[in-house]
Image (cartoon, grey):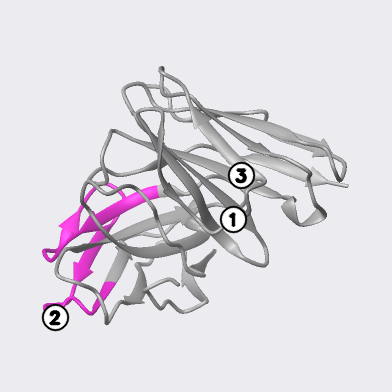
Amino acid sequence: DAKTTQPPSMDCAEGRAANLPCNHSTISGNEYVYWYRQIHSQGPQYIIHGLKNNETNEMASLIITEDRKSSTLILPHATLRDTAVYYCIVRVANNAGNMLTFGGGTRLMVKP
Amino acid sequence: KAGVTQTPRYLIKTRGQQVTLSCSPISGHRSVSWYQQTPGQGLQFLFEYFSETQRNKGNFPGRFSGRQFSNSRSEMNVSTLELGDSALYLCASSLATGRETQYFGPGTRLLVL
């Protein structure tokens, strides 16, 4: 079972920031938070990941609370092309393998 | 650098047949994972191969199998196809261990009639 809880859907106005929440209250100390998104019928696209510090890249920012029980993915200026399902995943990053457990994700609809 | 490629992109089979899907990872990547995506079950992990060995396996019947070649390319096979096997099959690759980010291919859409 997925270890994360996300709202099933969200709307965002084009040009505004999209803030996607994720709850992972049972996260372990050695588990990372990963975000992927999937645009309709395409393969999931990696966005960003972090352990405990906030992270930023050219696509998004990831804010992780101090207790690490929740996080927020921020798309600073959402465009129509950001309409997708966003998945928040927690996983241990070690040498045991690469299994990702996906939950239901959040369907983000960016509207003009 | 080219991304993960999967062939074929679309496939139609009938019940009882078998099918083989192919995945070419990003150059230099040695780990290949397979996932099944259906509207009812979402994205589910099938198995992972690293250095031609299956490293992890999801909860799927033995009809689902895979292999990896010395050049890291991977194939998955589904025998005795059932209607419920209709899905998008996704392949993901990463450098080696479980510490690196996985990158997904576009998927193969399989329809079983």
**A35 w.r.t. A12: above or below:** above
State which mark lies toward you, 2 or 1. 1
Residue A66: % across, % down: 11, 78
Q: Is residue A49 above or below residue B14?
A: below
> Do residues under tags 2 and 1 come within 8 Å of each other at their CB atoms?
no
User: What is the span of residues highlighted in magenta in the rendered image?
Assistant: A46-71
Determine the CA span between mark 2 and mark 1: 35 Å
Q: Which quadrant would the N terminus of chain B be assigned to in this image?
A: top left
Q: Closer to the camera, A12 or A57?
A: A57
N-term mark: 3 or 1: 1
Residue type pointed to by label 2: Asp
Provide the residue designation for mark 3. B89
Mark drawn on residue B60:
1
A55 is within the stretch colored magenta: yes
Please identify the residue farthest to the front as the structure is shown: B62
**Which residue bears the numbered disc 2?**
A67
Residue B24 in magenta stretch:
no
* Tag 3 and tag 1, C-beta contact below 8 Å: no
Q: Secondary structure at mark 2?
A: loop
State which chain disc 3 sits on. B
Q: Secondary structure at mark 3?
A: strand
Task: Please report the residue visible at 82 percent of the width from the left and 54 percent of the height from the top.
Answer: B83
